Structure formats: C-alpha cells, structure tokens
Amino acid sequence: MTQPSFLITIDTEGDNLWRNHRTITTRNTAFLPRFQSLCERFGLKPTWLTNYEMAIDPAYVEFARDVIARNQGEVGMHLHAWNSPPEAPLTDDDWRWQPYLIEYPDDVLRAKVAFMTQLLEETFQTKMRSHRAGRWAFDERYAAALTELGYLVDCSVTPRVNWRFNRGAPQGNGGTDYTHFPRSAYFIDPSDISRPGESPLLEVPMSIQYKYSPLMSAFKQGIYKLRGKQRSPAVYWLRPSGGNVASMKRVIEQSLAEGQDYVEFMLHSSEFMPDGSPTFKNEQDIERLYADLEALFSWVGPRFQGRTLTEYHASFMQKRRD
C-alpha cells in the first residue's frame, strides 16, 4: 500500500516581511541549507515557493539550483503583488497596504503571474509547476492564469480559514474566505475554485484542523458575533510556532482519519533565521524550532513518503489511473 505523502512547502521570501520594511533584504538565504539538510536526512523534499526578491538573489539561486540538480526538492512560484514586477500601483501606498493580487485588474494580474513565471523558469531552467498565492489570496482569474501557463499544482487554499477580515487595499473586500472549501486535493472547477471540476490544475489545500469540535467552534463564532466582533474560527496548522509538536501531530492524525492521502507542512524561509520573523526572534528560538522539527520529522519518517508538490501530482494522477 502506498504511503501518504508528506509535503513540505516553504514560502521563500525576504527577511521579516511582517515588519513591512520599505526595503527588503534576503539574508535568510544563508540559513536555508541547514533546513534542506535536515529534510534530506529524513527523506523529505521541500518545495521552495519562491518570490521576486529571492529569485534575483545570487546566493539563493545557487542554493536552489543545487537542490534541483540533485532532485532533493523543487522550486515553485510565490507572488507578493505589491513588490513583484511589473509595477502597477493600486493604492496610495502599496508597500503599506500590501494589496492582494486578486484586487488588481485582470491585465495586471496576468502580467505579474507571467513575469514571475518567466523569471523563475529562465533562472532555474526548469518548468514552473507549483504555486502558492501571496497572502493566501486566490480566485478564478488567478487559477485561469496559472492554468494557461502550464502550472499543475496550487496550494493556496487554507480550509476552515476566512481571510476576509484581513485587509489588503483599503477599498477592497479583504482576502479569500476558505471556510467551506474542500479539505483534500481536487481538480478545481474553473468557474468556482471552491468545488471540484475539470480544470487540469490540482488544488492541494493546507493541512488545518479546528482547535475545538465543530459544535464548540460554531458556539464561539456565535459569541463573537453577539459581541460585534468578526474573526476566523480557531485552528491548528501543520506549521511550527515554537513548542507545538503535539498540535502538529494532532493535525496529521486528524487529517489521516479524514481519509487524506497527504499532509502539508508550511513555513516561511525567513523563519529559519534569528529575528527573521515575529515568532523566532533569536538563536535560542531557532534551536527550539529545530528541536521541534527533529521530533516531528523523526515521527513522520516511517509513516509517510516525502514528495514535492509536483511529485504528489504525479502520484495523485497514478492513483486515478489505477
């Protein structure tokens, strides 16, 4: 029997973008080989979802080319609309508001996706097959642009999470509401990305579980509404946050109990660097992160097959043929 897939997805981007700096640095590149080596030790293959500033960083390019050459991982595309060419200001200060790509006009959306795809393919001399949207914002226009350019896999969907309360452009409607999206992989419907259809683009949703039972989650949401507050339901992600190995294992076990044939882990490249994120602020935090990763990956190893997103797509297709 084929083992379920363990998918590692890394949003590969500049240093501590949570601070919203006007200039972006890419010092976190120097900290990526340690994580790549850890993955290889446990037979796992990261998908490095790469955005603009990393794609033009020579040290990152050298690192990622080596990963590709040794078939120990994959480079995919990641796109932050506010700083990814071609420039097309949407607000009075895009660096402040960080608008979602789905808030831009159709022609700008397509141009930005096409530019990043060409840049990555020329830089790494490999076809771009996998993608994740910046700030998790995805829609039918975005899916169509990816399909036209030959992408096979998207992993932007975060089931059970509603990003509507997270603003982009001040005049916009916030991010995408994924509350009722599928929780397992599916070929999307081009006219409605929230349901399965006949598109060649495979959606591989993030592994996310409610912190509480569905009944308790609904109760808590009702309380928030009575208080005049809006927020997404409380969830656990398959994502390190410091000392949360137990909750990550819980997400994995619940996902498998639902019948999933994969689990999807994520982190940002800058989180491997001290002071590269709000979560891991110093060297001690980084060492605790790696202790958590060692514990998780050693537990995962015998239970899963490490695959990139494109390898998972191939496995998914093979099972459909069988």
Image (cartoon, rainbow, N blue to C red):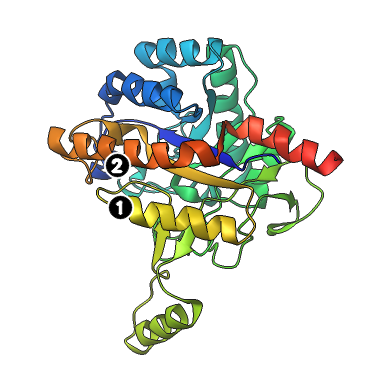
Marks 1/2 in contact by CB < 8 Å: the verdict is yes
Q: Nearer the viewer, residue 183 or 298?
A: 298
Task: Check disc 2 and report the residue beneath it.
Answer: 292
Q: Nearer the viewer, residue 135 or 160?
A: 160
**Crowdedness of circle 1 by 10 Å Cα count: few (<14), some, many (20+)?**
some
Q: Amino acid at mark 2?
A: Asp
Across and down, in percent, residue 171 comes to 43, 60
Q: Calculate the distance from the C-alpha at mark 1 to the C-alpha at mark 2.
A: 8 Å
Q: Is residue 17 left or right of residue 265?
A: left
The secondary element bearing badge 2 is classed as helix
**Crowdedness of circle 2 by 10 Å Cα count: few (<14), some, many (20+)?**
many
Across and down, in percent, residue 242 comes to 25, 48
Residue 173 seen from this side = no
Q: Amino acid at mark 1?
A: Asn
**Which residue does the image show at 78% across and 45% down from the upper left?**
199
**Which residue does the image show at 42% across and 48% down from the upper left?**
99
| Quadrant of the frame with the N terminus | top right
Q: Is residue 10 left or right of residue 143?
A: left
Residue 22 seen from this side = yes
Q: Is residue 287 left or right of residue 303?
A: left
**Which residue does the image show at 26% across and 22% down from the upper left?**
27
Marks 1 and 2, the one that precedes in the sequence: 1
The secondary element bearing badge 1 is classed as loop
Q: Is residue 197 above or below residue 274?
A: below
Task: Check disc 1 and report the residue beneath it.
Answer: 244
**Which residue does the image show at 85% across and 40% down from the upper left?**
322
Across and down, in percent, residue 28 comes to 28, 25
